[in-house]
Amino acid sequence: MSTILNAATYPPTLTKEETANLAIALRDWSLSQGLIIRAPTETNAADEASMHVPLTLHPSPFPKNLFDQALGLQTVFNELYAKVADDYEFLTEITKELAGVDDFMSDLWKLYLEVDEISGGVPAQPLTLGLFRSDYLLHTTSTAEPSIRQVELNTISASFGGLSSRAADCHRFLRKSGLYGTAAGSEFLKDENMPVNPSARGLARGLGVAHNAYGVKDSIVLFVVQQRERNAFDQRWLEYYLLEDFGVVSVRASLEDIAEFGELDSITQELRYKGRHVAVVYYRAGYTPTDYTSPATWEARKKMELSKAIKCPSLATHFAGAKKVQQVLIDELVLAKFVPDADVRGQLRTTFVDILPLDDTELGKKARTLIETCPEKYVLKPQREGGGNNVYREKIPGYLKALKDETLWRGYILMELIEPPQDVRNAIIRAGKVTEGNVISELGVFGCVLWDSKSHEIKQNFEAGWLLRTKFADSEEGGVAAGFGSIDSVLLI
């Protein structure tokens, strides 16, 4: 990165007083403009106490050509994962294997089979909505220019589209206010290098397009959320823009609420919540086993999956986001099944890193050898979302040996570590405290795709903005809601 942007001069050096003034302005702008998150407490006080989201003081540098590359690939990834979700045999083979070693995947798979049996293999609603996010890190070597490498693709509850729009606005406000000063490095801070981020409106557009496709006036979008959701304000921005741009009302409910107040018409398969007709079910919960607190919450999920409401995502699309699917798609022959155009496959493959299974295949045996000989080059990932679940480097062998049953290894993938630049600096403000240091940024690109799983026709497919999350270089995890990272915006260079 230092060959593109002088790391010695960016971010611009500020005096102690300038840093304090910048932090106060950032905090107050965040609190007044909804760039906030609920305070971390298990009590009902969480409904009242809020704080600014962890945020970088300056936008972080990111090469413009690689930023444009990531945005340009999103519609290709959207279509790829829609095709994966529609391939029953392919998804069944993968999910059955995971269900044998992962209790949560097993429960989801049983639910999928039950819904399929009840519906006679013909879903009540053929339309599916995907609000995806493909995440990337910059990858550097001593001999080549930086490139982007895909970390993962999220197919359920892809978060921070709402707040990331506000973060870009906040950094632009601070620049226009002159709070970044005039020291060396400030010359990079220009409007043309600090793009407006359309992610909140883009994701709301995806929900609005799905609602229009459903075609029932005065029907609602049901946001399925966690109880005492800390990240509610990120979700709220999508609700506000959905109402403003499409005139569509959203209603928030937990799985517990839906178990109590959700109703499925056995004849029409219409879903109603507290008497209101549901057009779209948008899952911002249900991706982790802790969301299912009782048998009734599983029944609530089944009720929604059986309904004619458009699901975002469907169970099949939920499965498509498994790390195992990402690992299998690394294979050129498998990828060719879904992406027949060799040039397009080549574009996708430039972002891939080596990912190996932990099974009895030759690749699985290779993975075991690598774990023994050079674990420092890899990260171990389970089929879990939400942050804080990965195992890194030298901790991998001991972690696997501690598993009681070696067959449980099949529930993990071994992924080659991406090597981001180590000389980028920034400051992060968290709960009012400013900390400076070397940082690593992860770019996420949002995408919306609406398709017919019966005819396999893509109805809508578009890129929907971006997210930049930044953490200190010595932190292994990067989830903001999980307490590891911060929201950021890009400085295109």
Image: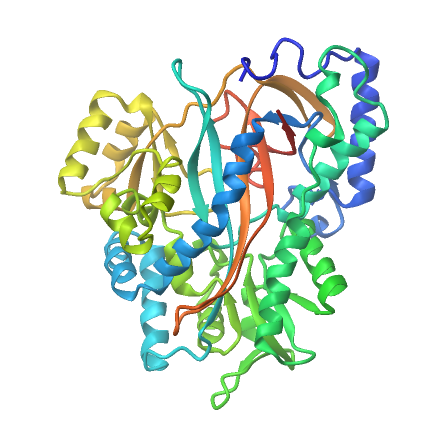
Residue closest to the eye, 7 or 23 = 7
* Residue at (49, 47) in percent of width and height: 74
Residue closest to the eye, 362 or 287 = 362
The answer to whether 317 appears left or right of 255 in the picture is left
* Residue at (23, 59) in percent of width and height: 93
- Seen in the picture, residue 356 relative to 393 is either above or below; the reply is below
Q: Where is residue 286 in the image (x, y as percent from the top left)?
A: 49, 59
- Seen in the picture, residue 151 relative to 243 is either above or below; the reply is above
Please identify the quadrant where the C terminus is shown. Answer: top right
- The answer to whether one can see residue 175 in this image is yes
- Seen in the picture, residue 491 relative to 239 is either above or below; the reply is above
Residue closest to the eye, 273 or 123 = 123
Residue sitting at the far bottom: 267
* Residue at (71, 25) in percent of width and height: 57
- The answer to whether one can see residue 442 in this image is no
Q: Where is residue 183 in the image (x, y as percent from the top left)?
A: 77, 11
Q: Where is residue 38 in the image (x, y as percent from the top left)?
A: 69, 45
The answer to whether 174 appears left or right of 389 in the picture is right
Query: Where, by quadrant of the figure, is residue 381 drawn?
Result: top left
* Residue at (43, 21) in percent of width and height: 140
Query: Where, by quadrant of the figure, is residue 226 drawn?
Result: bottom right
- Seen in the picture, residue 3 relative to 27 is either above or below; the reply is above
Residue sitting at the far right: 177
